[in-house]
Image (spheres, rainbow, N blue to C red):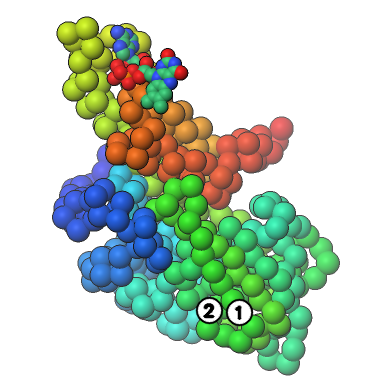
Amino acid sequence: MDFGFSEEQDLLRAEVRKLLDGRCGLERVRKLMETGPGYDPDVWRELAELGWLGLTIPEAYGGAGLGWVDLVVLLQETGRSLFPSPLISTTLAAAAVLESRSEEQKQRWLPSLADGTRVGTLAFLEASDSFAPGAIALTGKPDGDAWLLTGEKRYVHDAGAANLFVVAFRTGGAATDLALAIVDAGAAGVTSAGFPTIDATKRLGTLKLEGARVPRSAVLGVPGAAWPAIERLLDLGAVAVTAELTGAAEAALAITTQYAKDRLQFGHPIGKYQGVKHPLAEMHVELESTKSLLYYAAWAVAESPGELPRSASLAKAFGSDAFTRIGIDGVQLHGAVGYTAEYDIQLYLKRAKWARPAFGDSDFHYERVARLGGL
Ligand SMILES: Cc1cc2nc3c(=O)[nH]c(=O)nc-3n(C[C@H](O)[C@H](O)[C@H](O)COP(=O)(O)OP(=O)(O)OC[C@H]3O[C@@H](n4cnc5c(N)ncnc54)[C@H](O)[C@@H]3O)c2cc1C
């Protein structure tokens, strides 16, 4: 396995960086945070034109046909500048369609997810806020050539922006009697609403279904047998969030290191003192460790799917804790100004707090690693 990035991936990184620096630097991000949609539809369209929204969608369906390691490159850069957009959500919705293996369904939904006209997201969690299969209560009742879906999804990423929801629902009494269906935001009996989170660059929301009629042709895979597909989507979500958080953590470390060089105390930059130098070194080590775990998990997506659950959990567990510490230490090393709105470091601490529970916190993932290891 080659742990370095290819020339093409380095080029992709440079292109993404150039676009985000030019079109959506932190000053612009701060403005977007205050808006209703929370992201810039013009930049969203530009990303689509460059092929980045459909990066992991095959070319036959309008995408760029690249893999999850390439996606990591893109997401590290969006994370670095806290770029607000429903990119991860749309990528995961596309993954759900791709993995359904139905040619008709791929042709129906993937091109519009790749060109940005459809914004997708996964709707999995409910009031119990648990990732266990038994926690899905939203019920599907067969009705002729359709399913009638009733229930409520919570903590749905980008619920306010999405017009295509990939909804997990219950088809029977056993814990894993589950199915996945594509639900159109505009369909009868469907209401969705978004709200800002502690990190105003990210939005969550709710999806309410009241007897929403979903044709059988919109059910992905075999009804009642969707748990493995759902679990894989949650793993992909964990990898995607970890990719963004490593980019954000790198930026937090860079901002803090710069502050330590600029801020003079007793005639020296504070970075000269061990009390500042050592935490910076710890932040660096934690970041590099997260990156190694992340790259392995991203590689496993296509190359070793059996290893994905354990490696995704390790990356998300370690990364969630590491980024939280990096965010807190970053604010601390800035001294009293760190928490003020004028300084950018507080934005990264807030991103760390958003990323921690997204697709499972460290407790959930470490327990899963232990379970998968037979403990
Ligand atoms: C709203 C508010 C309330 C406050 N309340 C209190 C209070 O109740 N009690 C109180 O005592 N203070 C209080 N402060 C002051 C605050 O604790 C100090 O500002 C703090 O000591 C950080 O100093 P600084 O902002 O100048 O950071 P800087 O001097 O820029 O320091 C940044 C970081 O470097 C570290 N550092 C600096 N010099 C060295 C060195 N020589 N060796 C090792 N590490 C170093 C600092 O600990 C800090 O983590 C308050 C400040 C604010 C804004």
> Disc 1, disc 2: CB below 8 Å?
yes
Which quadrant does ligand 1 occupy?
A: top left
Residue 228 shows up from this direction: no
Q: Which residue is mark 2?
A: 185
- Return the x and y of residue 261 as percentages of the image width and height: 20, 21
Residue farthest right in this picture: 173
Foreground of the two, 116 or 339: 339
The local secondary structure at tag 1 comes to strand
Residue farthest bottom in this picture: 144
Vertically, is 214 above or below 225?
below
Vertically, is 69 above or below 283?
below
Q: CA distance from mark 1 to mark 2?
A: 6 Å
Label number found at residue 190:
1
Residue at 34% across, 40% down: 341
- Return the x and y of residue 222 as percentages of the image width and height: 66, 74
Q: Of callouts 1 and 2, which one flags the residue occurring earlier in the amino acid sequence?
A: 2
Foreground of the two, 211 or 305: 211
The local secondary structure at tag 2 comes to loop
Q: Mark 1: which amino acid?
A: Val
Quick check: 163 left or right of 53?
right
Residue at 71% across, 71% down: 151
Residue at 44% across, 41% down: 350
Q: Quadrant of residue 231?
A: bottom right
Please state, as top left, top right, bottom left or bottom right, where the C terminus lies in the image: top right
Quick check: 87 left or right of 270?
right
Please state, as top left, top right, bottom left or bottom right, where the N terminus lies in the image: top left
Q: Mark 2: which amino acid?
A: Ala
Foreground of the two, 269 or 323: 269
Q: Residues within 10 Å of mark 2 (few under 14, many from 20)?
A: many
